[in-house]
Image (cartoon, helix red, strand yellow):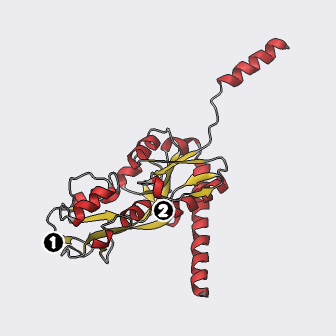
């Protein structure tokens, strides 16, 4: 019996370890000035991100969440080193790298997590205009966050400044008339933007650059191995979003 027990132990050691799912989200620009939300003992930055993390934990109670620079999040999930991205906008190119809810590479909008407007900021005295299709009055171009969809869209409009700057450098150049504007989504980056000492010298254009639904996307490998689990999680997130929005609407109507 002894040798059989030893053989069993050796077989167990050769089995792959079952690792809990890990989801990545964009690291805040400056964590020292950001107040995290604690979700099941995990510190998570951003109200939307924390809410989605809580919904994920209802299905995957051992899941963990890490914040990394966005480009690293993308590469780590694409390589299958991390389970998925906690919130990401869909593009045809990204559909080749990540698994979104939907069929034939087309996302199911009913399973989006929430919609994010990309806001445009210019100097208070700027003549730059955005009509929803094109920019008017540009001299130097606008900047945005590296790796975000806004970067590609600005490039397609020939409105992207080639400068790569951190948030404080960007505001400095904006108020000093070296760039025409800054495109930023809501969240920790926008909070940092508004805390800049010169933020009072800029204004937000009425129309956002665009509004994009965000999804939870998995690495293709994970969904190949767990197709039913992926579908179940996406459906659960859609149900939770509907319940959350209904509660928010009810709270507003009660005021």
Q: Which residue is mark 2?
A: 108
Residue at 57%, 74% in the rendered image: 245
Q: Can you tell which quarter of the image residue 198 is in? A: bottom left
Q: Position of residue 189 (x, y in %)?
A: 40, 60
Q: Which circle marks residue 137 in the picture?
A: 1
Q: Position of residue 103 (x, y in %)?
A: 47, 56
Q: Quadrant of the N terminus?
A: top right
Using residue 181 as the reference point, say whether residue 29 is left or right of it. Answer: right
Category of crowding for the residue at label 2, using alpha-carbon neighbours closer than 10 angstroms: few (below 14), some (14–19), many (at least 20): few
Quarter of the image with the C terminus in it: bottom right
Going 61% across and 76% down the picture, which residue do you hit? Answer: 247
Could one spot residue 209 in this view of the protein? no
Local packing at callout 1 (Cα closer than 10 Å; few below 14, some 14-19, many 20+) is few
Asked whether 210 or 222 is in front, the reply is 210
Q: Please, which residue is most extreme toward the front here? A: 197
What percent of the width, then of the height, locates residue 217?
Answer: 49, 52
Task: Say if 169 sits above or below 251 in the image.
Answer: above
Image depth: mark 1 or mark 2 in front: 1
Q: Earlier in the sequence, mark 1 or mark 2?
A: 2
Question: Can residue 9 be seen by looking at this rendering?
Answer: yes
Residue 173, compared with residue 8, is above or below; it is below
Rendered position, 242 above or below 250 = above
Question: Which residue is at the front of the view, 104 or 180?
Answer: 180
Residue 174: assigned label: none
From the viewer's perspective, is 240 left or right of 8? left
* Res 127 quadrant in image: bottom left
The image shows residue 175 at horizontal and vertical percentages of 23, 66
User: Which element is circle 2 on?
Assistant: loop
């Amino acid at each position: 019996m002894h040798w059989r027990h030893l053989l069993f132990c050796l077989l167990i050691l050769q089995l792959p370890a079952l690792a809990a799912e890990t989801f990545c989200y964009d690291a805040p620009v400056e964590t020292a000035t950001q107040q995290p939300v604690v979700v099941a003992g995990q510190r998570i930055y951003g109200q939307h991100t924390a809410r989605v993390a809580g919904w994920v934990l209802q299905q995957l109670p051992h899941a963990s969440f890490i914040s990394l620079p966005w480009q690293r999040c993308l590469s780590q999930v694409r390589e299958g080193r991390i389970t998925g991205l906690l919130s990401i906008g869909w593009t045809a190119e990204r559909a080749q790298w990540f698994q979104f809810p939907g069929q034939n590479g087309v996302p199911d909008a009913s399973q989006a997590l929430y919609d994010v407007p990309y806001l445009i900021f210019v100097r208070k005295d700027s003549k730059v205009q955005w009509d929803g299709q094109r920019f008017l009055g540009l001299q130097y171009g606008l900047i945005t966050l590296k790796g975000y969809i806004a970067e590609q869209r600005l490039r397609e409009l020939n409105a992207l400044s080639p400068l790569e700057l951190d948030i404080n450098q960007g505001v400095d150049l904006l108020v000093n008339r070296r760039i025409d504007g800054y495109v930023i989504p809501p969240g920790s980056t926008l909070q940092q933007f508004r805390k800049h000492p010169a933020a009072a010298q800029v204004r937000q254009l009425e129309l956002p650059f665009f509004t994009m639904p965000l999804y939870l996307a998995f690495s293709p490998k994970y969904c190949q191995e767990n197709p039913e689990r992926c579908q179940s999680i996406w459906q659960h997130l859609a149900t939770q979003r509907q319940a959350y929005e209904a509660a928010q609407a009810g709270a507003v109507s009660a005021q």
